[in-house]
Amino acid sequence: MSNDAEAMLTHAEKFAATWNRSQSDGRGATDAVDSALAEAVERSADLGIDAVGPSTGIALSMFARMLDARTVVEIGTGAGVSGLWLLRGMRPDGVLTSIDIEPEHQRSAKRAFLGAGVAASRARMINGHALEVLPRLADDSYDLVFVDAAPIDHPRYVAEGIRLLRPGGALVVHGAQRGGRVTDPAQRDPETVAAREATRLVAENPELLPLLFPLGDGLLCAVRR
Ligand SMILES: C[S@@+](CC[C@H](N)C(=O)[O-])C[C@H]1O[C@@H](n2cnc3c(N)ncnc32)[C@H](O)[C@@H]1O
């Protein structure tokens, strides 16, 4: 494991322990969630997946809790790190719909959810290209949409995400700043151009109330009015 991955694991454990102390009376269930999260972070590093860090994870849990989220769409399952944070904040009967093109990533995520004691009925895993899957999901139906897959396609994920949100629902885009390149007009690589376009779509949509949080590589959030 790389030093970065180790540091992330340590932080994730520390944050998760703090979070859980404020969330639960008994240790049994939370110990299982902590170790499932730590394993998912480790598995992500092994698979070369850039999973969300703990501060972004806490923010995802917090948004899900604030929205009393029952229906969440995640674009980019990875090995389940962000999914575990989202599920932690969602209602106990909430269902996470999570899309990923890599079956191996979703197998790892399923193992992580199982290890955390998440009922299989709470995780609807859809394997496929997000741009082919998203049009099959219903308009105006989801409390939260989390975007964290192929950066080049983020503008199209954002457009689909806005369509899926119920009024009052929230869109969250991971990695919106790309190491500061998005605000530097000299940077014209395709992924930075796409991230800039995704930000513009959110910022200029009169139906959205946007805010960029300085978490991770920029967490772009917006609430549908
Ligand atoms: C950054 S990782 C997601 C990490 C995850 N959200 C987490 O924090 O644990 C991006 C994921 O998007 C998936 N992906 C890439 N292109 C995709 C596409 N076109 N459709 C669906 N998933 C895709 C990759 O297989 C990868 O698992």
Image (cartoon, rainbow, N blue to C red):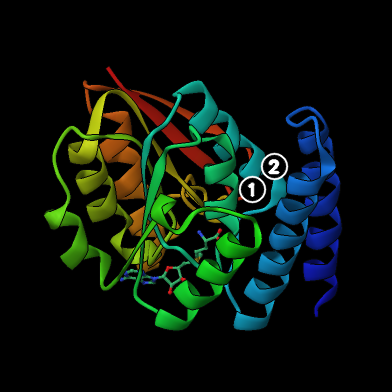
Q: Are marks 2 and 1 in contact (CB under 8 Å)?
A: yes
In the rendered image, residue 224, in percent from the top left (x then y), is placed at: 29, 24
Quadrant of the image for the C terminus?
top left
Up-down: is 35 above or below 220? below
Q: Is mark 2 within 8 Å of ligand 1?
A: no
User: What residue is drawn where x is 69% and y is 65%?
Assistant: 41
Q: Is mark 1 within 8 Å of ligand 1?
A: no
For the question of whether residue 102 can be seen, the reply is: yes
Q: Sequence-wise, which precedes: disc 2 or disc 1?
A: 2
- Marks 2 and 1, how far apart at CA: 7 Å
Q: Nearer the viewer, residue 132 or 95?
A: 95
In the rendered image, residue 6, in percent from the top left (x then y), is placed at: 84, 68
Up-down: is 45 above or below 163? below
Amino acid marked by disc 1: Gly
**Is 21 placed left or right of 173 in the picture?**
right
**Is 158 placed left or right of 186 in the picture?**
left
In the rendered image, residue 147, in percent from the top left (x then y), is placed at: 39, 51
Q: Nearer the viewer, residue 215 or 167?
A: 167
For the question of whether residue 188 can be seen, the reply is: no
Ligand 1 lies in quarter? bottom left
Callout 2: SS: helix
User: What residue is drawn where x is 85% and y is 72%?
Assistant: 3
Q: Pointer 1: what residue?
A: 216
Q: Pointer 2: what residue?
A: 55
User: What residue is drawn where x is 65% and y is 56%?
Assistant: 116
Q: Nearer the viewer, residue 127 or 157?
A: 127
In the rendered image, residue 205, in percent from the top left (x then y), is placed at: 23, 28
**Is 206 placed left or right of 39 in the picture?**
left
Callout 1: SS: loop
Amino acid marked by disc 2: Ser
**Is 116 placed left or right of 145 in the picture?**
right
